[in-house]
Image (cartoon, helix red, strand yellow):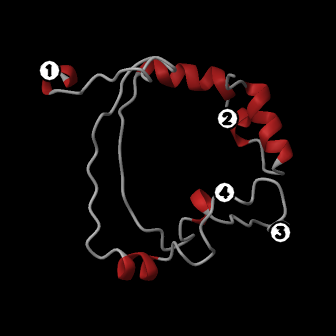
Amino acid sequence: NSITDGFCAKQKDVFQDPDDFNRQGGMAQMGKALERGMVLALSLWDDGALHMRWLDSLHIGPNKTADTPGVRRGPCEWGEGSPRNVRSKYANAKVRFSRISVGEIGSTFSHYRRLTDETLV
């Protein structure tokens, strides 16, 4: 399996979404961005606008229903991701990032390389 311009275009077509990836240059533009270098950024937040439905629930957009391909993004119920619900149910939640792997796609599954201060210099 691989991610290609064609794959991305087909996914957008099947899910009836605008093909914004290819419109912005597709894989060629992504390659140029990777050549410039990237920084991994990890972020945690509760989503007051969309309640994280785009990630793990029903992400219903214009002219779409719950049965439209691509709308069901995960198992969560419609209101589960609201900030009020998340904060009341998980008031003491904590996160620890560990075993972050760095390497070519497919090269980090059997082992991982731990990031150290020397790695980041």
**On the image, numbered disc 3 is attached to which residue?**
65
Q: Which labelled disc corresponds to residue 118?
A: 1
Q: Are marks 2 and 4 in contact (CB under 8 Å)?
A: no
Q: Amino acid at mark 3?
A: Thr
Q: Residue at x 27, y 39 (%)?
A: 98
Q: Position of residue 117 (x, y in %)?
A: 14, 27
Q: Secondary structure at mark 3?
A: loop
Mark sitting earlier along the chain (1/4): 4
Q: Secondary structure at mark 2?
A: loop
Q: Secondary structure at mark 1?
A: helix
**On the image, numbered disc 2 is attached to which residue?**
24
Q: Are marks 3 and 4 in contact (CB under 8 Å)?
A: no
Q: CA distance from mark 1 to mark 3?
A: 50 Å
Q: Amino acid at mark 2?
A: Gln
Q: CA distance from mark 3 to mark 4?
A: 13 Å
Q: Is residue 105 left or right of residue 11?
A: left
**On the image, numbered disc 4 is attached to which residue?**
73
Q: Are marks 1 and 3 in contact (CB under 8 Å)?
A: no
